[in-house]
Image (cartoon, rainbow, N blue to C red):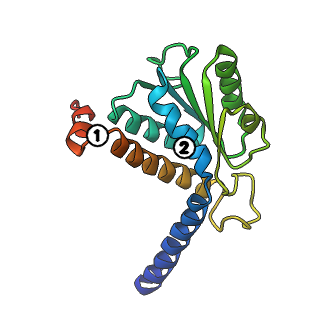
Amino acid sequence: MFKIDEVQIELEQAIALVLAENQRVLQAVSSPAIAQFLQAIPTAKRIFVEGEGRSGLAMRMAAMRLMHLGLQDYVVGETIAPSIRSGDLLIACSGSGETEGVVTIATKAKAIGARVVVVTTQAESTLGKIADTLIQLNAAAKQDRSQQQSQQFAGSLFEQSTLLLFDALFYVLAQNMDKSAETLWAQHTNLE
């Protein structure tokens, strides 16, 4: 059984590890790719997000923040998501860049004429090659159990850094779009 003093030490070490790994990944993100992405957001007619599993959960959180900015965005697969069109933007997220459903959706969106932003660990993956804008996160993909890029389990670092990246991008967009906290809050759901 765990002893309280041991738990505190182990938790502090784990927190330090998670924070350090995320900082390393996020500081290595390509500034030109981020600039392209930030320019694509306000010019897109509509924004769609796609990801599976925990990556999909991070994309759902990103979609909520885009909605707070007053942008028209959808989560692919939800019943209210309309058809994607030319001039729209798809943000596709897959650590491996090979998640079959995500690749299929990105391929279809690209063929229709939508712009595709990809977030992945693998630039040379199928999904990475589809991208108009590629945001590569140097984190371990979930199949990588070597612990060379992360001491954490499976794709944890990728999923965490995806969430943190999109929260940071939301902050940058809110500042540049002159959105105050009150303006953002007015977009928040009132049916809770």
Q: Label 1: few (<14), some or many (≥20) within 10 Å?
A: some
Q: Label 2: few (<14), some or many (≥20) within 10 Å?
A: few
Horizontal and vertical percent position of residue 119: 62, 42
Q: Which residue has dot 2 on it?
A: 35
| Disc 1, SS | loop
What's the residue at 55%, 38% (across, down)? 37
What's the residue at 56%, 45% (across, down)? 34
Disc number placed over residue 179 in the picture, else none = 1
Viewer-nearest of labels 2 and 1? Answer: 2
Is 73 or 54 nearer to us in this picture?
73
Quadrant in which residue 35 is drawn: top right
Is 126 or 57 nearer to us in this picture?
126
Horizontal and vertical percent position of residue 79: 47, 18
Is 161 or 38 nearer to us in this picture?
38
143 with respect to 37 (left or right):
right
Quadrant in which residue 76 is drawn: top right
